[in-house]
């Protein structure tokens, strides 16, 4: 099953995650409902610490908060000794509010505002990852006015293409992110930094994309980055010792997916660092990586209740759920694929009579024909009141959710050893208008 590691089926045919019957969770907390399995989440973080605990190379594992963040998630990440990357003032606020040590925060973002930079400096974040000349100048000016010195990394666009959807490729030369490694931009940014008494260059950063299965691109990324570091040393006399290679490891969304393991990724990266450090005569002291999806993705599922079931003979069968693109925009945004289970009747489809099986499109309740969570899936015949669980929704679902059509955002509940704990309350209708001002009157 494409479900969290604690998943099983009870005697009544209900799906159980973290020792909790998901149907009971739905009745207690309402649906749609995001469910996070803490055992799976803990295992992913432990695996990153284990496999990237190289004997002769220091590593910094920085959780990519854009995948999913809230106060409890940030606290758990910090409890496991991971840092956090943030890309907006809002993500920074969540991390600090949760008690994440500011020195373990990397501040990303391709268009940080003046206020966001000031907030990061006031908070004493560990490293600013500088994305462009505008930010570089603004950060240097603010630091000079305050008579402080801030650690930074320069984000490089390495020209390494990851085998993933074009919307989540971030390392191409035409990317909106970073200083291009071809030409003089990246070198010029390093020159400016080295000439500033208020900025301290710790190293360079790159991120090539997300949901990557062919991890050979990381070998190429390490090669390009270490070669560039050697060039910086040769041409500018500046020795860079820290390298951040971003995140991007893919996870399993549908049965045919075959993602590499965290251990596989760790092996490729370690071998690459050793190989290219020798080839270019330039070693590094510390390696950073920024996993997000591969930590939280398959730890999460979404529980929906089926409403209308519409069968169009010889054309298509629809099963409408009580959520949709407001809580999972990824299918309509870039064609993401998912798999689902009938959570209240978890019988093996292979044991069902053929006449009891249907092909369904699992569709949302929103006013868009493209509001389709799963285009085509074989399930036992559905009826109103059934419960559908969509797997691998821990990453980029809550964090990209909206109030489209006035839909309140889902609750998030964490489960472990038969107990459930609310991480985020479901929005109420009054939350939708709490900031509104009336046309007339007070």
Image (cartoon, grey):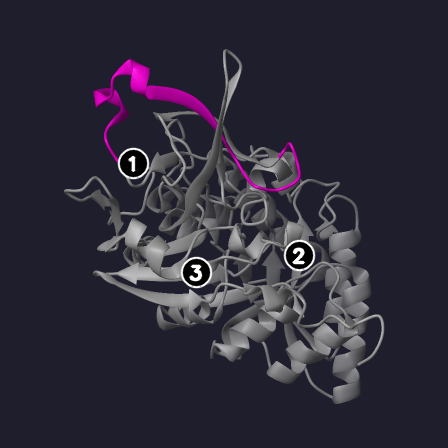
Vertical comparison of 396 with 268: above or below: below
Q: Position of residue 421 (x, y in %)?
A: 34, 67
Residue farthest bottom in this picture: 147
Q: Which residue is mark 1?
A: 1
Specify few, some or many for label 1: CA neighbours under 10 Å numbering under 14, 14-19, or 20 or more: few
Residue matched to label 2: 155
Name the quarter where the C terminus is drawn: bottom right
Q: Alpha-carbon distance for marks 1 and 3?
A: 22 Å
Residue with the mark numbered 3: 412
- Is 65 within the magenta? no
Residue 321: tell me if it is visible: yes
Query: Is any atom of residue 52 visible in this view?
Result: no
Query: Which comes sooner in the sequence, label 2 or label 3?
Result: 2
Tell me the tag on residue 121: none
Q: How many marks?
A: 3
Is disc 3 surrounded by few (<14), some (14 to 19) or many (20+) residues within 10 Å?
A: many
Frontmost residue, 417 versus 93: 417
Vertical position of residue 333 compared to residue 410: above or below: above
Question: As rendered, which of 328 and 230 lies closer to the eye?
Answer: 328
**Element at label 2:** strand
Q: Secondary structure at mark 1?
A: loop
Instruction: Give the side of residue 142 with respect to residue 23, left or right.
Output: right
As drawn, the residue found furthest toward the top would be 314
Q: Mark 3 falls on what kind of element? A: strand
* Screen quadrant of the N terminus: top left
| In-image side of 101 versus 204 (left or right) | left
The answer to whether the residue labelled 1 contacts the one labelled 2, judged by CB atoms less than 8 Å apart, is no
**Mark 1 or mark 3, earlier in chain:** 1
- Between 441 and 296, the one lying in front of the other is 441
Relative to 211, 351 lies left or right? left
Q: Which residues are magenta?
A: 346-370
Residue positioned 23% across, 31% down in the render: 347
């Amino acid at each position: 099953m494409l479900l969290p590691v604690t998943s099983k089926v009870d005697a009544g045919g209900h799906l159980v995650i973290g020792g909790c019957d998901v149907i009971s969770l739905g009745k207690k907390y309402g649906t749609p409902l995001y469910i996070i399995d803490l055992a799976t989440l803990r295992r992913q973080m432990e695996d990153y610490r284990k496999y990237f605990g190289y004997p002769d190379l220091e590593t910094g594992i920085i959780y990519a908060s854009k995948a999913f963040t809230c106060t409890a998630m940030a606290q758990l990440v910090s409890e496991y000794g991971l840092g956090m990357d943030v890309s907006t003032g809002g993500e920074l606020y969540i991390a600090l509010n949760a008690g994440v040590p500011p020195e373990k925060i990397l501040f990303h973002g391709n268009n940080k505002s003046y206020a966001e930079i000031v907030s990061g400096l006031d908070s004493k974040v560990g490293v600013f990852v500088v994305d462009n000349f505008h930010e570089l100048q603004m950060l240097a000016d603010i630091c000079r006015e305050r008579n402080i010195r801030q650690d930074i990394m320069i984000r490089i666009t390495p020209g390494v293409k990851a085998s993933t959807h074009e919307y989540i490729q971030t390392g191409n030369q035409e990317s909106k992110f970073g200083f291009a490694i071809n030409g003089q931009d990246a070198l010029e940014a390093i020159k400016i930094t080295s000439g500033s008494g208020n900025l301290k260059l710790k190293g360079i950063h790159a991120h090539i994309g997300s949901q990557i299965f062919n991890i050979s691109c990381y070998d190429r990324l390490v090669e390009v980055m270490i070669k560039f570091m050697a060039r910086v040393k040769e041409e500018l006399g500046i020795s860079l010792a820290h390298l951040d290679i971003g995140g991007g490891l893919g996870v399993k969304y549908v049965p045919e997916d075959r993602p590499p393991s965290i251990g596989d990724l760790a092996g490729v990266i370690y071998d690459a660092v050793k190989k290219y450090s020798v080839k270019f005569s330039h070693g590094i002291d510390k390696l950073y990586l920024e996993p997000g999806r591969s930590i939280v993705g398959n730890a999460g599922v979404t529980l929906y209740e089926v409403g209308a079931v519409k069968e169009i003979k010889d054309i298509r069968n629809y099963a409408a759920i009580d959520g949709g693109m407001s809580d999972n925009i990824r299918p309509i945004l870039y064609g993401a694929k998912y798999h689902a289970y009938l959570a209240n009747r978890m019988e093996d489809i292979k044991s069902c009579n053929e006449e009891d099986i249907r092909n369904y499109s699992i569709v949302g309740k929103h006013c868009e024909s493209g509001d389709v969570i799963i285009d085509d899936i074989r399930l036992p015949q559905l009826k109103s009141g059934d419960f559908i669980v969509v797997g691998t929704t821990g990453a980029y679902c809550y964090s990209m959710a909206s109030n489209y059509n006035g839909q309140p955002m889902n609750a998030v509940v964490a489960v472990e050893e038969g107990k459930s704990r609310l991480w985020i309350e479901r929005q109420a209708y009054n939350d939708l208008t709490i900031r509104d001002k009336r046309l007339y009157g007070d």
